[in-house]
Image (tube, grey):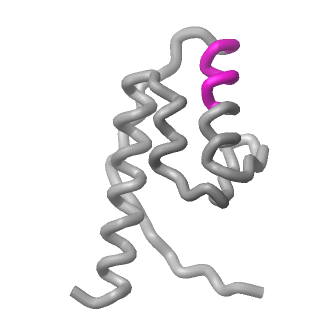
Amino acid sequence: MNRATADESLVAQVAAQFVTVWNAHEMLRLEEIYAADADFVNVIGMRWKGSARIAQMHMMQQDSAGAWRIAVSQNTDIQDLPIA
């Protein structure tokens, strides 16, 4: 397996883990998925830095939103983006 394929496999694993944690409503477990210096941008453009903050903000949003929808991942499209 070449490096690009291995990287894509790891990204797909993280996406699958996210869906599992989301559907279990165990947002604090997100800290286990992301690196300590991870960046996360949610669907409305809010940026959270670090695994602890990512988990904390998901937990806060879950608490304020009540019941969450179930996440389903049908396809993970991985693209290399140019770094400016």
Residue 60 vertical placement versus 63 (above, below): below
Residue nearest the viewer, comparing 43 with 30 = 30
Q: Is residue 33 magenta?
A: no
Q: Quadrant of residue 22?
A: top left
Residue nearest the viewer, comparing 26 with 65 = 26
x and y, in percent, of residue 79 in the image: 50, 75
Residue at x 46% of width, y 45% of height = 32
Tell me how many marks there are: 0
Q: Residue lying furthest left in this view?
A: 1
Quadrant position of the C terminus in the picture: bottom right
Residue 83 vertical placement versus 49 (above, below): below
Residue 15 vertical placement versus 2 (above, below): above
Q: Quadrant of residue 37?
A: bottom right
Q: Residue lying furthest top in this view?
A: 66
x and y, in percent, of residue 21 in the image: 41, 33
Residue at x 69% of width, y 13% of height = 64
**Left or right of residue 40: residue 47:** right
Q: What main secondary structure does the magenta stretch of the protein show? A: helix
Q: Is residue 61 magenta?
A: yes
Quadrant position of the N terminus in the picture: bottom left
**Left or right of residue 32: residue 62:** right
Residue nearest the viewer, comparing 58 with 80 = 58
Residue extent of the magenta highlight: 58-64
x and y, in percent, of residue 74 in the image: 32, 48
Residue at x 38% of width, y 24% of height = 24
x and y, in percent, of residue 40 in the image: 66, 52
Residue at x 31% of width, y 81% of height = 5
